[in-house]
Image: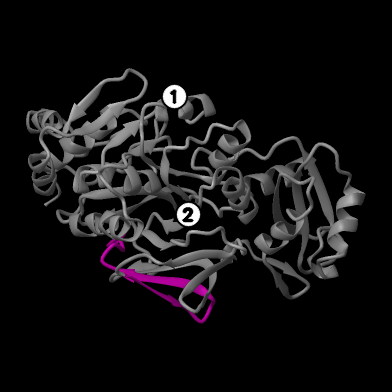
């Protein structure tokens, strides 16, 4: 099904530009891409593992489709999955992490995989005359659904950049009159601070981590550019999208459901996603959280007037003497201080008190003291939600997927105090 759809798309637009390597200037029309994919050699292995973030990644995906091989995208350093043969109806596998830490995969049929970009094109208004700039990972679920699949299944051209550094963005967009740019909050912050966000952006998208409303407002005031918050998961792709034309006033507001996706809140407060885009199962071991067209997320949410408000990860909740503190709520309060650039909050076991956790805040700042921060939060947070320890750092870097690794920071904190 996937390769047949690709052939239809390419055959309808044979002479149009499809793919560009921003590093070299090389480009391919849809016709040239189709000729290469039609002549692709039979893979020696029963699986295909597209790697990295370059042009070969795209053609390796097409080779898998052409020869009916299951495709499992990997980061450059990624480890190939289990050698077992996949069920015949499962054609695509996204890598995620199991609760034990051992890699597992999210398995899709062709129809499930194709449903996600169809929903995104309908919801976001992706257009062939606004090519996507590819500066995020092609292997990650966000990049694959937002860049690779719109190109191959909907004819949205893709310009692949070798880097996401500010100068790379400036050069990649220099000769493009109109573009779409999907990215993550950390990149938007970097590009905004460097003053390189191009005027040619017609559609700006942010996903992978919550988009701070302060950053959204800064970019809008400086550039007149609205960054649209996008919320999704590897298990289903797109979930919610903020289509509004003005900056949000509330960072918890992640948007309304994308087209053809149904959302509900479980009694636990976690979000339930239903739709044709939801994966079949985890593989090789199953999990009731993902089955029969339904995905139970670990995200605590509220849905008010059709708008999804993300409260935080259910697994990240901090138990403070029997009450549940949401790290994201505390982070938003701390970020109100003008001297704080980034912050990350987590809970650690109390040393003195037998039950419950103590709240720790990691703060990126160069001129603040612990005392000043404690005094600031004391005026806006109840005592039980106030951090008991402050870890001041020069920077809080993101991981390759644009996320702040809360668990890794928590582990580092515990190790440093062992």
| 299 and 230: which is toward the camera | 230
Which quadrant, please, contains the C terminus?
A: top right
Q: What stretch is highlighted in magenta?
A: 261-281
Quick one: label 2, few (<14), some, or many (20+) residues within 10 Å? Answer: many
Q: Can residue 11 be seen in this view?
A: yes
- State yes or no: residue 296 in magenta: no
| 148 and 241: which is toward the camera | 241
Residue visible at 78% across and 40% down in the picture: 365
Q: Can residue 283 be seen in this view?
A: no
| 354 and 407: which is toward the camera | 407
C-alpha distance separating marks 1 and 2: 23 Å
Q: Is mark 1 on a helix, strand or loop?
A: helix
In the picture of the structure, the residue carrying the numbered disc 1 is: 171
Residue visible at 37% across and 20% down in the picture: 23
| 358 is higher (above) or lower (below) than 72 | below
Residue visible at 21% across and 39% down in the picture: 47
| 256 is higher (above) or lower (below) than 229 | below
In the picture of the structure, the residue carrying the numbered disc 2 is: 228
Q: Which of marks 1 and 2 is nearer the N terminus?
A: 1
């Amino acid at each position: 099904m996937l390769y047949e759809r690709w052939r239809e798309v390419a055959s309808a637009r044979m002479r149009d530009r499809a793919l560009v390597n921003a590093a070299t200037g090389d480009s391919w029309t849809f016709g040239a891409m189709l000729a290469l994919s039609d002549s692709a050699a039979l893979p020696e292995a029963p699986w295909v593992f597209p790697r990295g973030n370059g042009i070969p990644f795209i053609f390796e995906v097409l080779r898998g489709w052409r020869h009916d091989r299951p495709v499992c995208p990997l980061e450059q350093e990624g480890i190939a999955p289990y050698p077992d043969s996949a069920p015949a109806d499962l054609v695509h596998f996204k890598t995620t992490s199991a609760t034990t830490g051992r890699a597992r995969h999210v398995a899709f049929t062709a129809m499930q995989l194709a449903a996600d970009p169809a929903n995104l094109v309908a919801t976001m208004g992706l257009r062939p005359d606004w090519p996507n700039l590819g500066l995020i990972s092609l292997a990650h679920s966000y990049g694959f659904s937002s860049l690779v699949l719109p190109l191959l299944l909907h004819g949205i051209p893709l310009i692949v950049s070798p880097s996401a550094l500010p100068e790379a963005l400036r050069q990649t967009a220099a000769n493009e009159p109109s573009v779409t740019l999907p990215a993550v909050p950390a990149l938007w912050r970097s590009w905004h601070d460097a003053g390189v966000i191009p005027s040619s952006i017609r559609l700006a998208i942010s996903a992978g981590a919550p988009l701070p409303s302060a950053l959204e407002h800064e970019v809008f005031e400086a550039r007149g550019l609205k960054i649209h918050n996008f919320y999704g998961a590897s298990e289903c792709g797109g979930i919610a999208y903020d289509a509004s034309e003005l900056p949000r006033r509330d960072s918890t507001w992640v948007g309304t459901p994308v087209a053809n996706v149904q959302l509900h809140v479980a009694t636990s407060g976690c979000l339930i996603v239903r739709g044709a885009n939801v994966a079949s199962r985890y593989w090789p071991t199953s999990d009731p959280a993902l089955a029969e067209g339904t995905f139970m997320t670990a995200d605590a949410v509220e849905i008010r007037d059709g708008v999804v408000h993300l409260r935080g990860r259910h697994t990240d909740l901090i138990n403070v003497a029997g009450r549940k503190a949401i790290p994201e709520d505390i982070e938003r309060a701390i970020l109100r201080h003008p001297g704080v650039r980034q912050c990350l909050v987590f809970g650690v076991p109390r040393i003195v008190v037998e039950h419950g956790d103590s709240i720790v805040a990691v703060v990126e700042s160069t001129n603040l003291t612990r005392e000043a921060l404690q005094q600031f939060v004391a005026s806006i947070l109840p005592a039980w939600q106030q951090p008991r320890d402050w870890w001041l750092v020069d920077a809080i870097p993101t991981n390759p997927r644009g996320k702040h690794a809360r668990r890794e920071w928590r582990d580092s904190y515990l190790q440093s105090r062992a």
